[in-house]
Amino acid sequence: MKSVLRPIYLALTFLFAFAPAVLASGGSHEAHEAIGALLPTWSIIPFVGMLLSIAICPLVKPHWWEKNMLNVAIGWSLVFIIPFAAAYGVSEALFRLLESVLLDYLPFIVLLLGLFVVAGGIAVKGTLAGTPKVNALLLLIGTLLASWVGTTGAAMLLIRPVIKANAWRKRKVHIIVFFIFLVANIGGSLTPLGDPPLFMGFQRGVPFTWTFYLFPMLLLNMIILFTIFFLMDKHFYNKELAEGRSPQDGQDNAVKEPIHIEGAHNILFIALIIVGVVANGILPKEFAFFANGAGLPIYDEIVLPYAIIVEIVLILLAAFLSLKTTKQSIRQLNEFTYAPIAEVAKLFIGIFITMIPALLILKTHGAELGLSEPWQMFWATGLLSSFLDNTPTYLVFLQTAGALGAVEGIHTSVGMVSQIMLEAISTGAVFMGANTYIGNAPNFMVKSIAEENKIKMPSFFGYMMWSCAILIPTFIIDTIVFFIFKFHVW
C-alpha cells in the first residue's frame, strides 16, 4: 500500500512546497484560459519523453526501470513544470499542477485503487480449464459486465480467473491482449457507468440510456473480435495439445471441483463504489449544497468539489471494508499484491502532469481542426484518446461538436449535438482506448497483473502491433458501416 501512496504523497508535497510563496498571486480566469493559446507545440516534448520512456526503458533496462519508474515520471514532470513556471510564473504552474493532481489524478487513482482492492477479494474457485470455449465465455462475461461495473471493475474481476484457467498453457499472450481489447475497453460503451468519458457526457446532459444506441456498433465489433479470438485461440490450443499439454495439467483428475465464488460479499463493496461514482454526477444536480462546483477552496480558482470528496470517501470506505472483512486466504488464492496498482500510480502521475500542455493546446485549438464529418470526429477523438486521457479528449470534441450548430439531436450543456456526431465521439473515446497500454487505465493494470503471473506481455510498441493489426481494420469497418453509409437501427 505504501508504494501506491508514495507518488501521491510526493506530488502533493512538491505542490504545496510552493504554496506559501504564491498564495496571494493567483491569476484570473481569463489569464488561465489564455495559456493554451500561448503554449508552443514543442511544450509537449516532456509528454512524448514520458511515453517513450514507458515504451523503451522496459526493453533496454528492465530491472533499472522497475526500481526507477517513479523517478523517471517525476523527472519528466520537472522537465515540463520548471520551464513552464519560468515562462508563465510559479503561480500558473502551481495552478496547473493542483488542477491536474487534485481534480484529475487523485479521483482517478482512488477509483482504480478501490476497484483493485475490492476485486482482489473475490476469488473464483473450481475446475476451470482454459479451452477456446471457456476463454470466449469468460471474455464475453467480462465484456457484458464492463458497461455496468466499469471497464476497470470488470477487468479486475475477471483477469485472475482467466489467468488461472490458462495456467497450463504456454501460448496465452493473445488471450490477455483480447481481454484488454474487449473487457478493459470496448465492453464499457453501453452505459455512463462503463467508461469515464460517457459519464462526463451524462453530467453534461446526455441521457443515461442514450448510450444504448451504441449497441449496434458494439455488437459488430464483438462479432468481429470474438471470431478472430476464437479462431486464434483454437489454433494455439491445438498446438498445446499436439505438444503434450492438456487442460488437466496440474489438476486432480479424480475430483472436479465445482465453480464457486469466495469473497462474494465484496460485490456489495463494488456496488458502494458505483454509488460513489454516480453520486459525483447526481448530487450537484439534486442538492443545492453540491451545486455549481461547491467545495473546498484549494488555491486561486481551484475548488475540490464536495461531490468528488463524497465519491473518494465512499470508494476508500469500500476498500477499507473489503480489507477488513475478507479472509487473507482469499487474497492469497488470488496472489494479490499491490505491485500492479503501484506501477499504475507511479507512471500515471507523470502522464497526468506532462500531458497538461497537450490538453491545453487541444482545448484551445480543437475547434480549429475543421472536423465536420462524423468519421473525422470518430478518428480524431479515438486517436488522441489512445495517448491522452480519453475523458478530457471526449469533452473537448463534445464542445467542438456543440459549436457546429446542429438543429436536431441531443440537448447538452455545450449545445445541440447531432446523434451521429455524439455516437462518433463516444465510440472513438471508448473503443480506441484499446489502441495502446496507456489509452485506458485498466490496460496497464491487466498487463501488470499478467506479468506478475509470469506471462511475458508485448512491449509498448509490440502491443500496438497487435492493435494496429486487429483493431484498426475493425475501426475502419465501423467507419464505413456507421459513419459513411450511416447504417443505424433507430
Image (spheres, grey):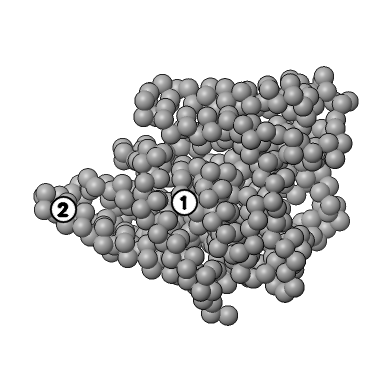
Across and down, in percent, residue 180 comes to 42, 51
| Rendering quarter of residue 47 | top right
**Is residue 426 shown to the viewer in this render?**
no
132 relative position to 107: left or right:
left
Tell me the crowding category of disc 1: few under 14, some 14 to 19, or many 20 or more residues within 10 angstroms, Cα based.
Answer: many
Q: Earlier in the sequence, mark 2 or mark 1?
A: 2
What label sits on residue 239 in the rendered view?
A: 2
Q: Report the residue at 48% width, 22% height from top.
A: 68
Among the 4 quarters of the image, the one containing residue 198: bottom right
Residue in front for this viewpoint, 136 or 276: 136
| Residue 182: x %, y % from top left | 43, 57
Which-is-in-front pick, marks 2 and 1? 1
Q: Secondary structure at mark 1?
A: helix
Q: CA distance from mark 2 to mark 1?
A: 28 Å
Which residue: 78% across, 46% down?
A: 306
> What x and y, as percent, mark residue 260?
37, 58
Asked which secondary structure carries label 2, the reply is helix
Q: Which mark is residue 434?
A: 1
* Residue type for callout 2: Lys
State the residue in front, 490 or 234: 490
Measured from the top left, where is residue 137 in percent x and y? 35, 63
Relative side of 125 to 271, left or right = left
